[in-house]
Amino acid sequence: MRHNQRALRIAIVVGGWQNILRFALAGLGVGLVTDETVANARTLLSSREAARLNESIRQLDTDEFPPDAVRRICRPNYDQNTPDLRPLASRLREMIGRSITKSVTRL
């Protein structure tokens, strides 16, 4: 990842947001996760871990790291003026919409 002439040195990559947060909370590095991931983690972590998580969260500077853009391209349902999506794709669209709404309301 390179933006504004800053290089990110990655020493190890782990999968699963639980693992990312646990490594970051243990002081073993930095974890980049979504707002929704943090919200989910708060409900699953112990109260002590959730408090530590709250203390350690830092939002990325949007001037330095602009948010990604998500675009949906699909054919329309002509009779309903809605996108023609299968159920799983429709659910993904709804989740992205909720996530975007949450992010915009925090600005």
Image: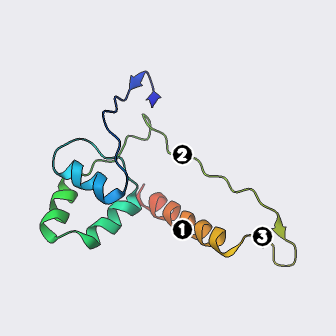
Secondary structure of the residue carrying numbered label 2 = loop
Q: Is residue 83 above or below residue 13?
A: below
Query: How far from the left and from the top, in percent, is residue 99?
Result: 49, 63
Q: Which mark is residue 7?
A: none
| Dot 3 amino acid type | Asp
Q: Is residue 66 above or below residue 94?
A: above
Which numbered mark, 3 or 2, is in the foreground of this view?
Answer: 3
Disc 1 marks a residue whose amino acid type is Met
Q: Which residue is mark 1?
A: 95
SS state under label 1: helix
Which residue is found at the position 81% from the left and 78% from the top?
Answer: 80
**Label 2 crowd (10 A; few <14 / some 14-19 / many >=20):** few
The amino acid pointed to by label 2 is Asp
Q: Quadrant of residue 30?
A: top left
Q: CA distance from mark 3 to mark 2?
A: 24 Å
Decide which of 20, 40 is in the foreground and name it: 20
Q: Position of residue 40 (x, y in %)?
A: 34, 68
User: Would you say 80 lies left or right of 71 here?
Assistant: right
**Badge 3: how crowded within 10 Å, few (<14), some, or many (20+)?**
some
List the residue tagged with mark 3.
84
Residue at 21% over, 59% down: 54
- What residue is shown at x 45% (from left), y 27% (from top)? 2
In this view, 82 is above or below 11: below
Camera-side residue of 16 and 105: 16
Looking at the picture, tell me which residue is in the foreground, 38 or 101.
38
Q: How many marks?
A: 3
> Nearest the camera: 12 or 104?
12
At 81% from the left edge and 73% from the top edge, which residue is drawn?
A: 81
- Give the labeled residue for mark 2: 68
Q: Residue furthest right?
A: 78
**Quadrant of the snapshot with the C terminus:** bottom left
Residue that lies at the very extreme toward the top in this rendered image: 5
